[in-house]
Amino acid sequence: MVVRPLVAVEPIATGPVELGGYDWLVLTSATGAHELKERAVGAPARVAAIGQATADAWGEVDLVASVSTQEGVLAELPRPAGRVLFAGAEGARRLLVDELGADFVALYRTVPVDPGGPVEGDLAVVASPSAARALAGLTTAVRVVTIGPETTKAAAGAGLDVVAEAPTPDLEGLVSAVTAAG
């Protein structure tokens, strides 16, 4: 097994982020949770996380989506949701912002990195849409396992051969998908 990171996280300097006055804070990545913890001022009434890893990165949360997608969070948030802050990656999908009229703050961006040589192998595992797009910029001649539906969509859209998708968006799910892909 060879590990070759394809993207790096670059924080976006937003300064302090005031959370007081929000009925819900919605976090869609562990990276976003870590970044926001460094800048948070005050506390929202409630916190929703897209999945358990994101919830663990933040700490105490009120809602963990049973389906780890923005659609999953949207389906489980009570309505009316009130004033909502969506804190995440620059260029994140806008479903939650659009559907909830949420405020949005970009805390970080992902940028492609040079993997230090040709990318080749029997199977590549990608854990984000940005990693899928970065891999496609280097090669499309490798079979791919993805961490979830949005990553699968990005990988397929970039011309990668997706052979399996993790049944759960975590290490256990990825191992299961790699095993199934053979």
Image: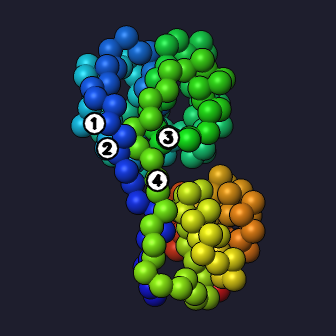
Q: Is residue 142 above or below residue 158?
A: below
Q: Which comes sooner in the sequence, label 3 or label 1?
A: 1
Residue appearing at x 64%, y 86% in the figure: 182
Which secondary structure, mark 4?
Answer: strand
Label 4, on which residue?
Answer: 110
In the picture, measured across the screen, residue 146 lies left or right of residue 13, that is right
Q: Is residue 28 above or below residue 182?
A: above
Label 2, on which residue?
Answer: 34
Question: What crowding class fits label 3: few (fewer than 14 Cα within 10 Å), some (14-19), or many (20 or more)?
Answer: some
Q: Which comes sooner in the sequence, label 2 or label 3?
A: 2
Label 1, on which residue?
Answer: 37
Which secondary structure, mark 2?
Answer: helix
What amino acid is labelled 1 in the image?
Answer: Lys
In the picture, measured across the screen, residue 92 lies left or right of residue 2, that is right
Q: CA distance from mark 3 to mark 1?
A: 17 Å
Label 3, on which residue?
Answer: 90
Q: Is residue 131 above or below residue 41?
A: below
The image's mark for residue 47 is none
Which quadrant would residue 44 be assigned to in this image?
A: top left
Q: Which comes sooner in the sequence, label 1 or label 4?
A: 1
